[in-house]
Amino acid sequence: AEAIRQLEAIVGVRVNRQIPSRCGPRATPAIARSNLSIEPPAVRVQVMGEISALVRPDGDIESAAADWLRTGRGLPSGPQAAWAYGCRSWSRHWPQIHRVLRMLDREQLKLCGFLTSKGKVYTVGSNADRLAVPEWRPGDPWPLSWRFRLAKKPQTRWEADHKDLALCGGNPCPATGLEIPPGELDLIPPRHARTVIITEGIGDLLAVVDALVELLEGPPAHEGIAVVALPGKGWRPEWTPELRLAKTIVSMVHNQPDKRDNVADQLASELPDSLVIRWNPPERPGPGRVGDANDAHKAGMLCPALEAALAAAGGWSRG
């Protein structure tokens, strides 16, 4: 109760009071791959494998995206965390990627998500101002879809409205962090975690990871904590069994009561044992309120919020 009071004392935060009471993982049937998405076309698996082979060996992300994460988002460890989650820069490899796409006919391009509704080849990945974010399905060896996050402050109304663009069609992974790139020992997926922290969007995910590294003085995975980012466009039922495998769940999401698919409300409904923290509640108007996890981190409020949330949910406590 004291941890909840501490959380609610943080400006701009509202917390649901249904605290997890179970002392172990919820019994959940094995997750069938067919529940996560329809099996993708073979050509998509092949092409995405070729693209992954081109971009994965990169030792870092491009300087524009790295600078945006460090300064624009205020995340000192943001570039390293983004790279660990599989984020890459497509623009430096676009000539090779384009050669792969030129080998495909129009139907194959459509199956792979590279043909727009107007019949043009989708080239947003060639933009150096976009950070390529992988979308993995659990169990797949490489991402079968990608999103492209604008890695700068929007300069036009179109950029402001299209900060996050995805490949056309296809079967994207439910959320960032459900699957971890092979070899990333400092990250774990929810099915191997004791505690899962849910955020909205890659920016908030990286902010939470950055704050956790500071709070825990080491990688979150060493404390059995996984961090997942939902797209924020409505709940998908296939997320529920994957996330409910964890003992405790803390959700730090935007509060948008006017939206029909408000993720905060859906989280409270689908994961009733979770601790849902709603940034920017309508009953706390004014310039001091916090819009999201990244805003809280810049204001120095995310670490204390995470510490209180983990204590309240029973996921971790200092000492």
Image (spheres, rainbow, N blue to C red):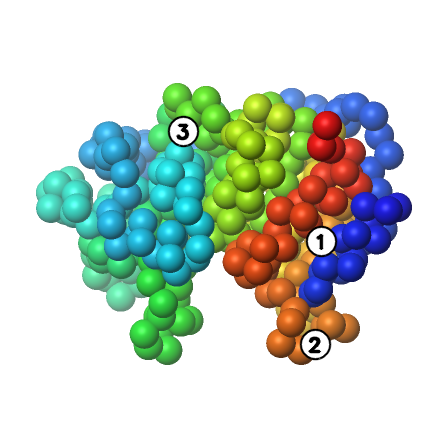
- Sequence-earlier tag: 1 or 2: 1
137 or 150: nearer the viewer: 150
Q: Label 2 is placed on what type of residue?
A: Pro
Q: Label 3 is placed on what type of residue?
A: Pro
- Sequence-earlier tag: 3 or 1: 3
Instruction: Please tell me how crowded label 3 is: few (under 14), some (14-19), or many (20+) other residues with Cα within 10 Å.
Output: many
Query: Which mark is on residue 285?
Result: 2
Q: Label 1 is placed on what type of residue?
A: Ile
Which mark's residue is nearer the viewer, 1 or 2?
2
218 or 36: nearer the viewer: 218
Q: Which residue is mark 3?
A: 181
Q: Secondary structure at mark 3?
A: loop
Q: Position of residue 228 (x, y in %)?
A: 56, 41
Task: Examine the rendered structure and indicate whether residue 45 appears above or below residue 105.
Answer: above
Q: Position of residue 112 (x, y in %)?
A: 30, 44
Which residue: 37% across, 78% down?
157
Q: Secondary structure at mark 1?
A: strand
Which residue: 71% across, 53% down?
277
Which residue: 48% across, 46% down?
206
* Residue 308, visible in the rendered structure: yes
Q: CA distance from mark 3 to mark 1?
A: 28 Å
Q: Is 228 on the left-hand or right-hand side of 56?
A: right
In this figure, what is the number of numbered marks?
3
Instruction: Please tell me how crowded label 2 is: few (under 14), some (14-19), or many (20+) other residues with Cα within 10 Å.
Output: few
